[in-house]
């Protein structure tokens, strides 16, 4: 596995960021990106997640839907998704359903660490 690519179920840009913040504030239960909800608080990155991101030896990249689809125009996935890139191939590392089943950032981190260790064996 070369890189883990996290694709959020949101588009990039200030307008979309403002809409996402409003959605998190006024209707958090209907927010469409559990990956976003796990890794970010309403206004900033979750500190537990940020600590993990800073200490991990995994090569990780973060993209929004529009950024991912520009970079990989012939790939289609259900978002949010975490992909593993091996040379030129993309594979699902954690699916939308698996991400949506997670209830905490700690659970996300443990799942990533466990699954990445298993892939390296």
Image: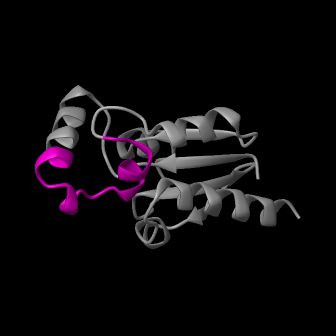
Residue 110 percent coordinates (x, y): 64, 60
Q: Is residue 11 in the magenta section?
A: no
The residue range painted magenta reads 23-41
Question: Looking at the image, which is closer to me, 116 or 90?
Answer: 116
**Which residue is painted at 44% across and 46% down in the image?**
39
Q: Is residue 23 visible?
A: yes
**Which residue is painted at 46% across and 48% down in the image?**
73
Q: Is residue 35 in the magenta section?
A: yes
Residue 5 percent coordinates (x, y): 57, 47
Question: Looking at the image, which is closer to me, 38 or 74?
Answer: 38
Direction from residue 116 to residue 108 in the image, left or right: left
Q: Is residue 91 visible?
A: no
Residue 51 percent coordinates (x, y): 59, 36
Residue 70 percent coordinates (x, y): 43, 40
Work out which residue is located at the far right of the displayed protein and give it: 121
Question: Looking at the image, which is closer to me, 66 or 46?
Answer: 46
């Amino acid at each position: 596995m070369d890189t883990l690519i996290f694709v959020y179920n949101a588009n990039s840009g200030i307008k979309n960021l403002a809409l996402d913040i409003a959605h998190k504030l006024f209707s958090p239960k209907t927010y469409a990106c559990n990956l976003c909800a796990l890794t970010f608080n309403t206004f900033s990155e979750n500190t537990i997640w940020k600590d993990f991101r800073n200490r991990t030896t995994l090569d990780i990249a973060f993209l929004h839907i529009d950024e991912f689809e520009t970079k990989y125009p012939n790939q289609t996935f259900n978002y949010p998704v975490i992909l593993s890139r091996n040379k030129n191939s993309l594979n699902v590392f954690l699916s939308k359903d698996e991400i949506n089943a997670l209830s905490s950032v700690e659970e996300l981190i443990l799942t990533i660490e466990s699954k990445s260790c298993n892939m390296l064996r």
